[in-house]
Each structure stands twice: as structure tokens, then as C-alpha cells.
């Protein structure tokens, strides 16, 4: 504990050497001794406290609690615990949590850093312009807010990556194109903040909410406390209609990409037979490549997906990420209750709209509903053709080789839909 304060603080405020005492009392003893010799009351912030768990966490909390009555001469006057969650949500075992602030029942208040407004994002970026002369175009600032919804870390991370790495020359104007480029860099790189959120996806009560959201299903009987938990984490928000949704477009990209990492790592080498001789994407070749891939590797790869309910979606997205491979983009749309996931693959001059549906046991063939939904999605994309992929997950579904087929259906409005049954 003494290493960094010894560098940052003047000699009279530096903590003494770490005391030699029994395990489970060292933090308490160190803070007590520091408070006793310090000429000023100590205010201490402990960052990433929620990275601790089980008995280690309990021990730290109890030591802080034991020192509370000795403030300020015998312990820090105030201690702030910084993390992604409230004390009551700190994990104390694999399937349990504190549910209460005990053994840290001296908590005064929990504070959450709210998101910036669009005006505050503009004001923040204007400060950089005033200091350096480097200009963010109005469209670039609007796009940053649209992508982040004002999430403070994302707002700052995008700006820092642009002005320090991508466009450090202050004479370079920050445009929409630069913001888009940096967004992809952050998503691919998954810096600490994004990686921390991705880690939360493994928690059972987070998975119970995120998995049906990605599949477009109803949440079911999810405790209100768990819904509040994902909101407190910043993963989700309640929109103007009170519906639960992913907090911002960047998170909407990060979450499925994280979940496709294992299927992608398990995927065999695939020859890019979907490209023409000039390097353009050929949708017909892509379809044949996908069918061959799924017939050989699809079902085995389903076992590698961490979210079984959307395992087919994740494997398909892993395949499409291999197709894109840094030369295009794959965007997703999903929401509770729609029973679908929409994908938009862009590669060069080709834009392909794809809708994913699941045929579940004791339910009707979703092709009719899927055609209507896809038609609406394609209309928004300005396309007159697309794919409807139907995953047959019924208990009595035929063998894959028997059910794997395609057909082209032209809707009443003239939209050509390739229906793919897998």
C-alpha cells in the first residue's frame, strides 16, 4: 500500500510501512497506523473492489467495518468503494451474493455516474477544440452520442483514441468516418471497460436476461432485482416505453461478439470461396459456402456456444465474422419479444439483410411470420432481397442432412427471399 502514496504524497502524509500482523487484520492495521500518524483525516478510495469475491471480499469488508468506530484518529475518515455494482451485489459464492450491505452495514450512499447528455458531449469535445484547435464536426459529435448514449467511459475512449492515435495532428478535422473507424477499433480491442462488461455475461442472472434478449424472446419470470442489477451494471436501460434494452449501440455490438469468440476459436480453416476473382462478395457463393459449412461443422460447433438458447445464432455470426474478416461489417438488431434477430452484412458494394428465426417444439413453422418481418427489415435497409434462416430446434426435427435445404420465395410486394432451413 505504501508504494504509490510514497511517490504521490508529501513526506508528512505518506503511510508508514506495512505492519506485521496476523492474516485477516493487515489491511485494518495498516489503515489504523496511517490514520494515527497522519496530520490530516484520510479519505480513501479503493478501485475495482468488486474484483474480489468469496472470503477475500468478506475479510476486506470486515476489516473496514471494524475500523469504522475509530475514525478519524484511528482509521480513515471516509472510504469509497469503486466498482460496477452495489455492495449488496458483491459475489460471495458461485451462486450467491450478499443481498444486504452486511457485513459492511455502515454504507451511507451508493452513487452512480450518470451518462452524459448530447449537450455535455458537445461541451466536452469543445474543450478539446479550445485547447488544441482541433475541430469535431457536428455530425461526428452527434454520432459519438448515438453510439455511446453518453456512457462516460465510451465518450472519453473514442475521443482519446482519435486525438492521440488515429488523428493526433490538431489540423485534422474529426469526421464521422474517423468516429466509425475508432468505434470498430474499440469493439475489436475490448479495452478494460468493455472486457469487464463482457465478463459479467458469464454470471447466471445476467445470462438469464441477456440470452432471451439476443434471441428476441420474452424474459419470463426474472426477479426485479436481477433486472435492476443489469441496469446498475450499465448493460441495459429502460427505454421511454419502459422496455428493457441494451444500453447503447456499442454494447449491442460487443455482447454478441464476445459470445461468438469460442465458436470462432473452434471453427476450422475456411477457404473464402464466397469471393469473386476480383475480391467482391458473391451472395450465391456465400450461400453455398454456408450450407457446406453448416452440414459439416454446424451442429458440432453448437456445443461450443456459452448461451445454448441462441447457439445457432452465435455459430452463424461466427461464420459471418470469418466472411467479413476486417473487410466489411456485421450489424445486429434484437429486442425482447420479437422472436428474431436481424443481421446486416456489408462487404464492398454488397449489403445482405438476414433474419434468424427458430422453429421450436410445439410451435408452428415460423416461415410466414419470418417473411413478413424480413420484408419490413429489408424495406428499412432499402433492399429488395435477403435471407430468412430458420433453425429447426424441435425435438423431433429430421436429421440435418434431410432438413438442410433452400428455396426462393417472392413476396406479394416483389421481395425475393432465400429461405434457408438448417
Image (spheres, rainbow, N blue to C red):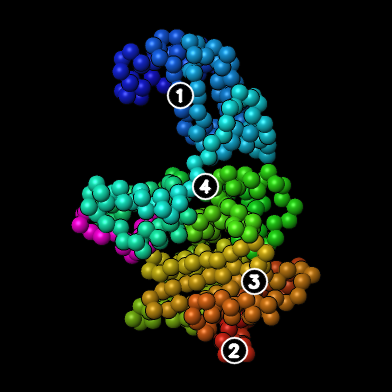
Which mark is drawn over residue 197? Answer: 4
Q: Could you tell which of marks 2 and 1 lies nearer the N-terminus? A: 1
Q: Is residue 285 left or right of residue 178?
A: right
Quick one: 99 or 359, which is closer to the camera?
Answer: 99
Q: Could you tell which of marks 4 and 2 lies nearer the N-terminus? A: 4
Of helix, strand and loop, which one carries label 2? loop
Q: Label 1, label 3: how many angstroms apart (C-alpha)?
A: 52 Å
Our reading of the magenta stretch's main secondary structure is: helix
Quarter of the picture containing the C terminus is bottom right
Measuring 44% from the left and 81% from the top, which residue is drawn there?
Answer: 282
For the residues bearing labels 2 and 1, Cβ distance under 8 angstroms = no
Q: Given this view, does label 1 or label 3 mark the residue nearer the observer?
A: 1
Q: Is residue 91 left or right of residue 277?
A: right
At which x and y percent is residue 307? 62, 56
Q: Could you tell which of marks 4 and 3 lies nearer the N-terminus? A: 4
Query: To which residue does mark 1 refer?
Result: 44
Badge 4 density bin: few <14, some 14–19, many ≥20, Cα 10 Å: some
Measuring 71% from the left and 50% from the top, which residue is drawn there?
Answer: 222
The answer, for residue 372, to whether it is visible in the render is yes
At which x and y percent is residue 179? 35, 60
For the residues bearing labels 1 and 3, Cβ distance under 8 angstroms = no
Which mark is drawn over residue 357? Answer: 3
Tell which residue pokes out farthest to the right in this image. 362
Residue 282 forms part of the magenta stretch: no
Q: Could you tell which of marks 1 and 3 lies nearer the N-terminus? A: 1
Of helix, strand and loop, which one carries label 3? strand
Measuring 33% from the left and 13% from the top, which residue is drawn there?
Answer: 12
Query: To which residue does mark 2 refer?
Result: 413
At which x and y percent is residue 24? 56, 18
Amino acid at each position: 500500500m505504501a508504494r504509490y502514496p510514497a511517490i504521490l504524497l508529501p513526506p508528512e502524509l505518506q503511510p508508514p510501512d506495512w505492519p506485521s500482523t496476523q492474516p485477516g487484520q493487515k489491511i485494518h492495521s495498516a489503515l489504523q497506523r496511517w490514520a494515527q500518524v497522519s496530520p490530516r483525516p484520510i479519505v480513501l478510495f479503493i478501485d475495482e473492489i468488486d474484483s474480489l469475491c468469496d472470503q477475500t471480499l468478506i475479510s476486506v469488508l470486515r476489516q473496514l467495518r471494524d475500523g469504522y468506530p475509530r475514525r478519524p484518529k484511528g482509521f480513515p475518515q471516509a472510504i469509497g468503494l469503486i466498482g460496477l455494482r452495489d455492495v449488496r451485489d458483491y459475489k460471495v459464492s458461485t451462486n450467491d451474493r450478499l443481498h444486504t450491505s452486511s457485513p459492511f452495514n455502515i454504507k451511507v450512499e451508493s452513487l452512480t455516474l450518470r451518462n452524459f447528455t448530447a449537450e455535455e458531449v458537445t461541451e466536452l469535445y469543445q474543450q478539446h477544440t479550445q485547447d488544441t484547435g482541433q475541430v469535431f464536426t457536428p455530425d461526428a459529435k452527434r454520432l459519438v452520442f448515438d453510439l455511446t448514449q453518453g456512457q462516460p467511459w465510451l465518450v472519453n475512449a473514442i475521443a482519446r483514441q482519435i486525438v492521440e492515435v488515429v488523428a493526433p495532428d490538431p489540423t485534422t478535422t474529426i469526421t464521422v468516418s474517423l468516429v466509425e473507424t475508432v468505434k470498430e477499433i474499440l469493439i475489436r480491442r475490448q479495452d478494460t471497460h468493455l472486457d469487464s462488461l463482457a465478463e459479467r455475461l458469464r454470471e447466471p442472472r445476467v445470462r438469464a436476461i441477456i440470452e432471451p434478449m439476443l434471441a428476441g424472446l420474452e424474459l419470463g419470470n426474472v426477479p426485479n432485482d436481477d433486472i435492476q442489477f443489469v441496469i446498475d451494471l450499465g448493460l441495459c436501460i429502460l427505454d421511454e416505453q419502459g422496455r428493457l434494452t441494451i444500453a447503447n449501440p456499442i454494447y449491442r455490438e460487443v455482447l454478441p461478439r464476445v459470445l461468438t469468440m469460442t465458436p470462432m476459436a473452434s471453427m476450422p480453416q475456411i477457404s473464402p470461396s464466397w469471393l469473386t476473382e476480383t475480391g467482391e462478395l458473391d451472395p450465391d457463393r456465400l450461400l453455398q459456402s454456408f450450407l457446406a459449412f453448416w452440414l459439416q461443422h454446424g451442429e458440432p460447433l453448437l456445443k461450443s456456444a456459452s448461451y445454448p438458447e441462441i447457439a445457432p445464432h452465435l455459430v452463424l455470426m461466427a461464420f459471418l465474422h470469418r466472411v467479413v474478416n476486417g473487410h466489411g461489417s456485421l450489424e445486429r438488431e434484437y429486442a425482447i419479444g420479437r422472436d428474431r434477430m436481424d443481421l446486416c452484412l456489408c462487404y464492398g458494394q454488397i449489403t445482405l439483410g438476414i433474419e434468424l428465426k427458430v422453429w421450436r417444439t410445439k410451435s408452428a413453422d415460423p416461415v410466414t411470420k419470418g417473411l413478413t418481418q424480413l420484408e419490413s427489415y429489408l424495406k428499412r435497409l432499402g433492399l429488395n432481397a435477403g435471407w430468412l434462416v430458420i433453425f429447426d430446434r424441435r425435438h423431433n426435427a429430421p436429421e440435418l442432412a434431410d432438413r438442410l435445404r433452400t428455396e426462393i420465395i417472392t413476396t406479394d410486394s416483389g421481395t425475393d427471399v432465400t429461405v434457408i432451413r438448417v
